[in-house]
Amino acid sequence: MNFAALVEPIYLLSAILFVVGLKRLQSPATARAGNGLAALAMLLAIVATFADQEILPWTGILIGIVLGGSIGGIAARFVEMTSMPQLVGIFNAFGGGASALVAVAEFVASPAVGLSTPGITIMIGTLIGGVTFSGSFIAFAKLQELMTGNPIILPGQNLLSALLLLSVLTLGAATLGVFGEGDPLILFYAFCGLSLLLGILLVIPIGGADMPVVISLLNSYSGLAASAAGFVIGNMVLIISGALVGAAGLILTQLMCKGMNRSLANVAFGGFGGSASVDRADIGQRPVRSADAEGAAAELGYVNSVVVVPGYGLAVAQAQHELRKVGDLLEDRGVDVRYAIHPVAGRMPGHMNVLLAEADVSYDKLYDLDEINDDFVNTDAVLIVGANDVVNPAARDPDSVITGMPILDVDRARRVIVMKRSLSPGFAGIDNDLFYLENTLMFFGDAKASMSDLVREIRELA
Amino acid sequence: MGELMIGLYVFVLATLAGRELITKVPPTLHTPLMSGANAISGIAIVGAIVVTARADGTMQTVLGVAAIAMATINVIGGFLVTDRMLSMFRKR
C-alpha cells in the first residue's frame, strides 16, 4: 500500500489538532483535554514522518527516542512544582538545541550550499536555535542556583553583545561564500560557536526577578527555531507549530514586561536590580510594628475577608501546603479567603497559580491584579507571604525607580500582615514603605515555620 | 509562488492565529501554557527524524540522533509535566 499520499493529510490534521488543543487551554476545565489533543497531534506528525521516509535507520531513531523519552519522563514525573521555572528553562534549551542540530545536519550534508534560500534558512535556524540553547542553559543555571542569580555585567556589555552579533552575521555571510573562497565547514563551526556565545552573553546580565521575561522570550525563540527548522527541511507542520509557540512566548513576554512597567529593551539591556543610584543606608532603619503567630492569628481569625498575596518567598520556603491549611481553617471560621496573584510573582508566568493548585487551593479563588485591586479597600486583612516589590506603594510615587509599575494596592486594606524574614529590600533594591505604615504588622520568620505556627494558633482561637 | 513564499504565508498566518488563541488563555494557566508550548516546540523531532533518515555519513547520523533525543525530552517531558500540572487545577 502507498502511504505517501496520506502523509500531507496527516500533517494537516496534526496542525489542526495543535490549534484546537491550544484553544482548549483557554479554560482550566478543558485545558487537560487540550494538552492531550496537542500530544495526539505530535504523535500523528511523527507517524506521518515515518511513513514519508523510504529508509528508516531504526537503531539511531530508537536510541534517540528511548534516551530522550526516559530523561523527559523522569524529569516530568519527579520535578517539584516550585522548580517549574528551571524545568521550562532546560526544556527550552533542548527544543532550541534540537532545531539547531537539524539545521547543522543539513549544512554538513551540503557545505557548499552558498548564498541561496536553503543556505540562508540554515544559518537562521542555527543562529536562533543556538542562542536559545545556550541562553536557556544559563537561565536554567541561574534558576537552579548553579550560578549566581544576580546580574553579571561585563565592562562594555552592550557594546560587546553588539560586536558579537555583527561578527556572527559576518561569519554567516562568509560561510555562504559572500566574501569569496574559504572552507565553509570551518567558517560554519565558528559561526555555531559564536551563536552559542551570543546566547550566553544575552542572558548573564539579567537578574532573578526578571526571569519571567527571559523564560518567556526564550520560549518564543524555541518556537521560532522550530519554524526555522521547518523552512530548512520544507515542512509546514514545523512552521505552523513553531509559529504558535513563538506567538505564545511573545505574548507572555509582553504581559511580563507590562507587569513590571518596563520595556523589553530595558529588561534585556538595563541591568536592573541592586542599582547603585539608590541610597541603601537607611533601608530597614525605621521602626515597624511586629506581631507573632498568636497576634497574626487573632488579626486573621476574627474578620470577614482575607486576601493572601503570595510571592517568590512562598516558593523558596515551600510553604504552599501550610498556606492552604491556614486558608482552610479561616474558611471554617467563616472568613472569605481569596488569593491575589501579581503577574510577575515568582520566577515564571503563572508560577504562584501552579503552586497553589498543587496545594489544592481551588482555582476560582485565585484573582489576578485587575480583578482584585478595587476590592482591597473593602478587605479586612491582607496576608503577604514572601512578596515585596509588587506590593510597594512607592510605585505610585513619581520619583521612585519602580514608578508606574502595577502593584497590588494592599495598603488600602484595613490591616496588612507581612510574613518575611527581615526588612531587606526586594529585587528593585529599594525600601518598602508598606512595612512602616500604621496598619501594617511585620510577622518575621521563615515562611514555612511561621505558617505552621499560624495554623496552630488559628486552631486555638475561640 | 515558490516554496519559501508559501512557507512565509503559513508562518505569518499561524503566528496571527496563535496570537488570537493565546491572548485568551487566563493568567492562572500561564505556566502550563508555557510547558505545553515547550512540548509543541519539540515538533523539531520531525526535522530530526528527516535528517537522520537522509544521513549519509556518521557525522549527520550523530547530529540527527542527538536532535531526536533532545526533541524527545521536550515532547515527552513537556506533555507529561503539563498533564501533571493541569491535573492539579481543581475547583472545590
Image (spheres, coloured by chain):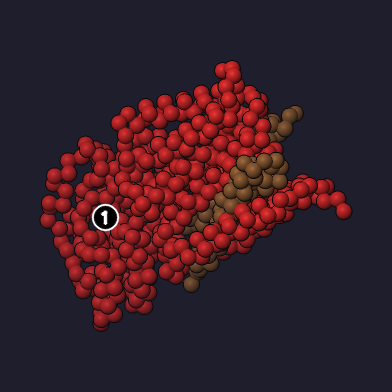
Residue at figure coordinates x 59%, y 37% from the top left: A104
Camera-side residue of A279 and A127:
A127
Residue drawn where x is 78% and y is 47% of the image: A54
Residue at the outermost right position: A1
| Residue A121 falls in image quadrant | top right
- Which chain shows up in red? A
Q: What residue type is labelled 1?
A: Asp
Query: Toward the viewer: A181 or A392?
Result: A181
Q: Which residue is labeled 1 in the image? A: A411
Quadrant in which residue A260 is drawn: top left
- Quarter placement of the N terminus of chain B: top right
Name chain B's colour: brown
Please tell me how many numbered marks the rendered image carries: 1
Helix, strand or loop at mark 1:
helix
Q: Looking at the picture, does residue A162 appear above or below residue A38?
A: above
Residue drawn where x is 25% and y is 65% of the image? A446
Is residue A199 left or right of B15 when viewed as pictured?
left
Q: Is A282 located above or below residue A420 in the figure?
A: above
Residue A179 in percent (x, y) is at 56, 18
On screen, residue A273 versus residue B29, left or right, reads left
Q: In this view, does A422 lie to the left or right of A130?
A: left
- Locate residue B26, reporting x and y percent: 50, 54
Indicate the position of residue B85 as horizontal and vertical percent values. 51, 63
In the rendered structure, the residue with mark 1 lies on which chain?
A
Please say if A395 is above or below A115. Answer: below
